[in-house]
Image: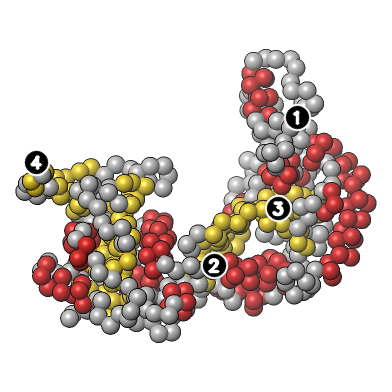
């Protein structure tokens, strides 16, 4: 049999190391060889990868597909990943249940022909199709009074699927990818599109994981990184979880801080992140969502701006102001290691809280606006203390109602709201977090043993933080009441355009 076999005895991927048997993956396309990066990516995920070319000879190709099962042990299965014409053939071939022995998943990329949407595959097989381009052919079989007619092939227009994910039902799960063409998932083709390729890769990996019935733990590797980065302040341990066969990337979006590649990330963490966190900073996890190759964290962060923070407030000297924000971190993992991290927060809220942005200072020339639609720590406090079952006050949409009232020329705005609109949640946001509520875990501490034991060492530190906040409470209130005055000769928003 003419196949190219890429085995992975030393792979670091999850499936190979975490399963007693092999996770065999047959990749197929109509060319004698195939995109080496795609083959390597699936090998690194722990699959035993075989490449089977499709040359148009259906009988020979079927023999090759059948031989993929050779050598599988009891209870072991295989999956197929097919592209183009090979994808069309596999979609038709595996419609017959007798051809699906040992097959647990079939994923096809941009097939040129798909079966009738009324067709049904065996329920034991995961089927997923990625569609691209403007049209695709569909083979239908007319049925009259229980008799099947001659197969008919018609061209159908590919309309975008539902929502932003473009999910489509063509008798099985499918996704459309608008604005890209067939070939978008092959790195060596001009049609390659990184965003569409990565999205399709995640969906494909999920189909295979479910097909092979693998439950993967992504959380442990991510927690090890967080421990090293925020608490142990260890550069080597911070860098260890990152991939090294491809370039990892980290982007702190509001300030475009971070880096691409291991060398740049090491320099970023060493010079601009580690030991650059205020001692008062505390992090509390609000929610965590774990996907097939991603971890999404929603964190409540609170700190006093007592030192420079290059990755959040580059070039801003300490203001000693108290800040509360919500951080959202989206982490992608490849082959069990960190591949990318995108971090987001409300930078306008941070600037309001440190006194660099006053909602009442509207740029000159802007008509019909008396305040900027931004808030301070109120936003983070709302997320932290939100309780839909016990809530008695209406906090949402107050800026919207204020704007509508102003447009209707009403003289009286919502009671309890000053002319700048900064008093919406003031009574709640001004209060310190009672009984340590929401304080979270303090950064830059020597880690103790994790778990139910080993937390008593932090009690004195927590009490010290309480005293520090109470001591500065009055001053902090005065800081928020002050209106920042632009210094003479300071740059305006319009002046700050990419100056080097």
Which residue is rendered at x = 76% and y = 35% of the image?
425
Closer to the camera in the image, 315 or 262: 262
Evaluate if marks 3 and 1 touch, with contact meaning CB atoms under 8 Å apart. Answer: no
Which quadrant holds residue 283?
Answer: bottom right
The residue mark sitting in front, 2 or 1, is 2
Mark 3–mark 2 Cα distance, whole angstroms, equals 22 Å
- SS of the residue at dot 1? loop
**Tally of marks:** 4
Disc 3 or 1, which lies upstream in sequence? 3
Q: Quadrant of the N terminus?
A: bottom left
Residue 26's place in the image compared with 154, above or below, is below
Q: Secondary structure at mark 4?
A: strand
Gap between marks 3 and 1 measured at Cα: 26 Å
Tell me how far mark 3 sits from mark 4, CA to CA: 63 Å
Marks 4 and 2, the one that precedes in the sequence:
4
Q: Earlier in the sequence, mark 1 or mark 4?
A: 4
Determine the CA span between mark 4 and mark 2: 52 Å
Residue 373: x and y in percent read 66, 34
Mark positioned earlier in the residue sequence (3 or 4): 4
- For label 4, the residue is 144
Between disc 1 and disc 4, the foreground one is 4
- Residue sitting at the far left: 150
Q: Nearer the viewer, mark 3 or mark 4?
A: 4
Residue for badge 3: 300
The answer to whether any part of residue 359 appears in the image is: no
Name the residue carrying label 1. Answer: 420
Which of the two residues, 110 or 74, is positioned nearer the viewer here?
74
* Residue for badge 2: 218
78 versus 393 height, above or below: below
């Amino acid at each position: 049999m003419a196949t190219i076999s890429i085995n992975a005895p030393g792979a670091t991927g999850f499936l190979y190391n975490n399963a007693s048997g092999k996770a065999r993956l047959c990749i197929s396309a109509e060319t004698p060889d195939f995109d080496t990066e795609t083959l390597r990516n699936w090998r690194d995920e722990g699959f035993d990868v075989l490449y089977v070319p499709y040359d148009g000879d259906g009988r020979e190709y079927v023999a090759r597909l059948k031989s993929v099962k050779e050598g599988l042990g009891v209870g072991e299965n295989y999956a197929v990943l097919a592209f183009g014409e090979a994808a069309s053939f596999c979609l038709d071939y595996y419609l017959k249940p007798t051809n699906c022995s040992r097959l647990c998943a079939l994923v096809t990329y941009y097939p040129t022909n798909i079966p009738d949407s009324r067709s049904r595959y065996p329920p034991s097989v995961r089927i997923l199709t990625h569609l691209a381009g403007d049209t695709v052919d569909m083979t239908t079989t007319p049925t009259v009074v229980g008799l099947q007619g001659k197969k008919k092939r018609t061209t159908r227009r590919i309309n975008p699927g539902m929502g932003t994910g473009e999910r489509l039902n063509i008798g099985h799960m499918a996704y459309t990818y608008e604005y890209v063409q067939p070939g978008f998932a092959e790195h060596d083709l001009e049609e390659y599109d990184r965003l569409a390729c990565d999205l399709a890769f995640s969906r494909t990996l999920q189909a295979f994981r479910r097909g092979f019935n693998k439950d993967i733990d992504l959380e442990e590797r991510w927690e090890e990184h967080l421990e090293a980065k925020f608490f142990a302040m260890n550069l080597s341990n911070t860098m260890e979880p990152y991939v090294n066969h491809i370039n990892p990337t980290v982007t702190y979006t509001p300030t475009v801080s971070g880096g691409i590649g291991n060398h740049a990330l090491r320099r970023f963490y060493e010079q601009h992140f580690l030991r650059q966190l205020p001692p008062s900073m505390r992090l509390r996890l609000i929610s965590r969502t774990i996907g097939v190759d991603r971890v999404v964290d929603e964190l409540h962060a609170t700190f006093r701006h007592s030192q420079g923070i290059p990755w959040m407030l580059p070039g801003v000297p300490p203001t000693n102001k108290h800040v509360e924000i919500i951080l959202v971190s989206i982490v992608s993992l490849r082959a069990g290691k960190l591949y990318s991290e995108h971090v987001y927060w409300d930078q306008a809220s941070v600037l309001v809280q440190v006194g660099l942005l006053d909602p009442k200072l509207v740029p000159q020339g802007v008509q019909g606006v008396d305040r900027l639609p931004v808030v301070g720590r109120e936003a983070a406090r709302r997320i932290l203390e939100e309780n839909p079952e016990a809530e008695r006050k209406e906090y949402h949409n107050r800026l919207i109602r204020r704007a509508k009232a102003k447009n209707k020329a009403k003289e009286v705005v919502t009671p309890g709201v000053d002319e700048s609109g900064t008093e919406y949640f003031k009574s709640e946001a001004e209060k310190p977090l009672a009984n340590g509520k929401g304080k979270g875990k303090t950064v830059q501490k020597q880690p103790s043993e994790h778990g139910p034991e080993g937390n008593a060492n932090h009690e004195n530190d927590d009490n010290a933080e309480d005293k520090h906040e109470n001591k500065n409470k009055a001053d902090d209130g005065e800081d928020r009441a002050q209106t920042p005055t632009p210094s003479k000769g300071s740059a305006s928003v319009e002046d700050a355009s990419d100056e080097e």
